[in-house]
Every structure is written in C-alpha cells, then in structure tokens.
Image: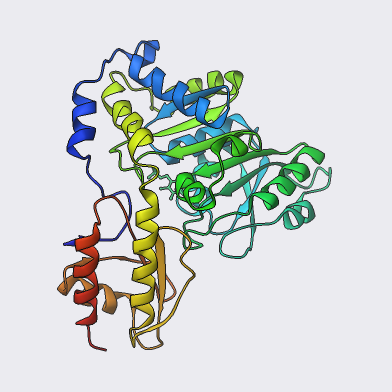
Amino acid sequence: MIDLRSDTITKPTSEMLEAMMTAEVGDDVFGDDPTVNSLQEKTAEMFGMEDGLYCPSGTMTNQIAMRILTRPQDEVICHKYSHVYLYEGGGMMYNSMLSPKLLEGNRGRITADQIANSINPDDIHFPKSKLVVLENTMNKGGGSIYDIEEIKKIRKVCDDHELKLHLDGARFFNAVVTTGESPKEYGKLFDTISICFSKGLGAPVGSVLLGTKDQIKEAKRVRKVFGGGMRQAGYLAAACIYALDHHIDRLAKDHTRAQIIGEVLKSLPFIEEVMPVDTNIVIGKLVEGKSEKWLLDELEKQGIRAVGFGKGLVRFVTHLDFGGDDLSMFEKAILKISS
Ligand SMILES: *Cc1c(COP(=O)(O)O)cnc(C)c1O
C-alpha cells in the first residue's frame, strides 16, 4: 500500500529505534529525564529561544500557547482554515474561552495589513484582540510558505498593538529547508513557536513548545492540567533528537517527489487543476461530476491512499516512508484509473 494520507503515518527507522532503546531516562514530571531535557535545550538553542517544553502532540503545544498568551474573553486572529481553529476540536474556545477572528488569505496566509485592519477598538462590546497565530507551512493552503518579510511586518503590527504572535510550525522545517532560512530568524519574530516531530521528521510522538523561561514555566503548569505530563518520556524524546540530527535535510527529497506527483496529477483527465506544490503537500481538484469518494475508492483499488479535503479536493502528502521506488509504483498505478 502506498500511503499518502499524511506525513504522520511514518514508523521509526531502525536507527531511530536504536536511539530510543538506548536512551537515558528519568521521571520527566520531576524534570529528571535527561533526554527530554536535552531535546528541549537543543530545540531552544536551534531557534535562539530561552526554553522549550516537550508535549505529546502539536495540538497540545498550540493549545498551551494560546492559553498562556491570553486571558478568557480575548480574541485570537488567524486564518479561517488554520489548524488552531479548524482541527483542534474548538479547543481555543473550550480550553481557554477565546473567540477567533477568522481572516481569508492567499493559500492560508494572512497579511500584516489584514491583521492591522481587523484589530478591535478598545470598546467593551468587542473581545480584546490579543494574539495572532500563523501556520508555516500552511496545511490547508497546500503546504504554502510564508514570506519572512511579511512576517516581519506582522511582528511590527503586533508590537504596535500589544498583540502576541504564535507560530504553529507543525511543518516548520519543510519551510526552511526550501527557503534556506535559519530557525533563529523565526525565533526572533515569534513569542512562542510549536514544532512537530511526528510529521515530516518521522518521529513517533511529540511536539516542542518554545518561548521564554517564564512562559515555559507557565506552560508546564498548563501541560499538567491538560494531562500531558509524561514520565519516562526520554524514550520518545530520543527519537525527536535523532530526527533533528538526521531527518531535516532529507525533507527536500519529499518536496521533489511531491512536485512529481503534482505533474502526474495534472496529466490526468479527471483532475481539473493542481495547487502549486511548494513543499510536501499536493492538492488536486477533481473535474465536475467526479466525487472525492470516487477517486479515493479508485486509488484504493490501485493500492494508493490519499485523503478527501472537501469541495472536490484530494490531498497527497509525501514523507519518509515514501521512497523513489514507491514513486515509480505510484506513477504506474494512478495511470490505471480510467475516468
Ligand atoms: C498536525 C498539525 C498539528 C498538530 O497535530 P497533532 O496531531 O496534534 O500533533 C498542528 N498544526 C498543523 C498545521 C498540523 O498540520
């Protein structure tokens, strides 16, 4: 089976498993796990930020960030298709009593001008605009990348209006492998950053939240109440350290393979158009009269898995467990689907 549903489906390589099995561990709720501590320090150092906190999921790191950067009744400004709004079960409302302000934007990216124009006036009728969340790369935007110059302008708007800025960087490394920028440039621009290890980096579990020492101290308190304090988590953190050392540069291969998938899709009679492929996500739009379910069923018959993305869109994501041979098989198999 060629599984392109998500880059989360990967399993640890034998080298990664070896790193996990030989990890030195302790009780991380007591702060005693040397491998977790080392992952947190290593990630913070990479981004030039003060401290980090290892959490079970990217949803949790985002939810914790939104909690510590706001107070109940505040407003969060984000894209209408952002993960924090669309895919976290209404968590910002449920966990932190926040209201979202949803902006439109080019392939999931919002601009400094839009943000500046959407900040609420100081008037008791309105929730207080307090936090901006950006997603880079942007999942619903087909793995689109923010222009760092725009992010600098957004930072300026945030500073001028006393807003905080959080980065949902679940696929952050897919962005910087493409642009050649350093994580440190991003560390300077955001108050908090969330990084996922279980996506393109290929680790089984976990995300790290980055921020100041004080923010991470507060984040630890929130992680506890969310039920995310883990004990000998060093076995998992070891996989993340391994991924940082060995799986970042190779993301470029996923991007090349995604480009090729995009070209193949374009040639198919039942695909009307393919979104630009900037990183490892390929989104194809079906011609009228063909449903997502039809294509997913046909793909399944050919041993290929993808996901429906609504409104006649189907998403394919390349990853560590999709190699060159798989790509050749994919190309042959998908051509067998007749419309
Ligand atoms: C996957 C993802 C997350 C986190 O998801 P978890 O499954 O909770 O780890 C957050 N943001 C984006 C954009 C994602 O794609």
In the image, what residue occupies the spot 20% across and 32% down? 17
In the image, what residue occupies the spot 73% across and 57% down? 114
Residue 327: give x, y in percent of width and height. Answer: 25, 65
Question: Farthest residue in the right direction?
Answer: 122
Q: Nearer the viewer, residue 20 or 30?
A: 20
In the image, what residue occupies the spot 30% across and 38% down? 203
Quarter-of-image position of residue 260: bottom left
- Residue 129's place in the image compared with 242, above or below, is below
Residue 20: give x, y in percent of width and height. Answer: 23, 27
- Can you see residue 52? yes
Rendered-image quadrant of the N terminus = bottom left
- Can you see residue 309? no
Its colouring scheme is: rainbow
- Residue 102's place in the image compared with 130, above or below, is below
Quarter-of-image position of residue 329: bottom left
- Residue 47's place in the image compared with 280, above or below, is above
Residue 198: give x, y in percent of width and height. Answer: 34, 41
Residue 322: give x, y in percent of width and height. Answer: 25, 56
Horizontal arrangement in the rendering, residue 15 relative to residue 81 (left or right): left
- Residue 148's place in the image compared with 13, above or below, is below
Q: Nearer the viewer, residue 75 or 131?
A: 131
Quarter-of-image position of residue 262: bottom left
Rendered-image quadrant of the C terminus = bottom left
